Image: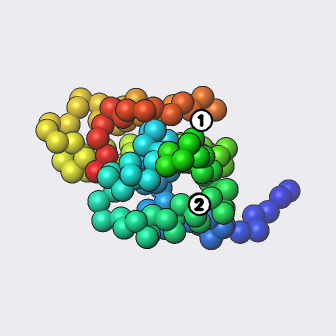
Amino acid sequence: MTGVKQCPIRVAMERTSIGKKWTLLLIRNILFGMDTFSDMMRTNPGLSSKVLNENLRQMMDEGLINRVEIKPRDVRYTLTPMGRDLNRVLFEISRFGAKHFPDEVFEDKPPVDPVGFFGKQFRIPDDEIEVMRKPVVSLR
């Protein structure tokens, strides 16, 4: 029988930046098709360009994202297979936030099914992820 050497959550948090303040929000941006530097600055108030640069560089070094230069001054970031594996994690965090903090998540009256509302943003199952260019919800 195989025993557990270390907690897999601890290993993931220590081996990658997913526990840092901005990482999951940047993964969310790329997953939703807001994959340029300016998109990420616009949708993450409080994030400085210096911190964004540092985070993107670290996420590339860790193998979570790739930098793709389409043409000069048109750089986009894409998720690697490792980065796409966070899809379900973000989906579950969205469900958690919608369920437990609906007044902070939704502008008006929460939808009848606030948890299901976010299913439109994610491509479940994970192996069928398609990036959306325009999200159904605005990200702030």
* Residue 126: assigned label: 1
Residue 83, x across and y down, in percent = 60, 49
Q: Decide: is 53 above or below 103.
A: below
Q: Is residue 83 left or right of residue 111?
A: right
| Residue occupying the point 46% across, 38% down | 33
Residue 54 or residue 68, whichever sits in front = 68
Residue at figure coordinates x 71%, y 69% from the top left: 6
- Could you tell me which secondary element the residue under label 2 belongs to? helix
Q: Return the residue nearer the eye: 88 or 63.
A: 63
Give percent across and percent down for residue 109. 14, 36
Whether residue 130 is visible here, answered yes or no, is yes
Seen in the image, is 60 located left or right of residue 130?
A: right
Please identify the residue farthest to the right as the structure is shown: 1
- Mark 1 secondary-structure assignment: helix
Q: Earlier in the sequence, mark 2 or mark 1?
A: 2
What is the C-alpha distance between the residues marked 2 and 1?
Answer: 20 Å
Q: Quadrant of residue 121?
A: top left
- Residue 111 rendering spot, x and y as whole percentages: 23, 32
Indicate how the structure is coloured in the image: rainbow
What kind of residue is marked 2? Met
Crowding at label 1, few (<14), some or many (≥20) Cα neighbours within 10 Å? Answer: few
Residue 66 % position (x, y): 62, 50
Q: Is residue 15 above or below residue 29?
A: below
Q: Which residue type carries mark 1?
A: Asp
What is the crowding at mark 2: few (fewer than 14 residues within 10 Å), some, or many (at least 20)? many
Q: Which residue is mark 2?
A: 59
| Front label number (2 vs 1) | 2
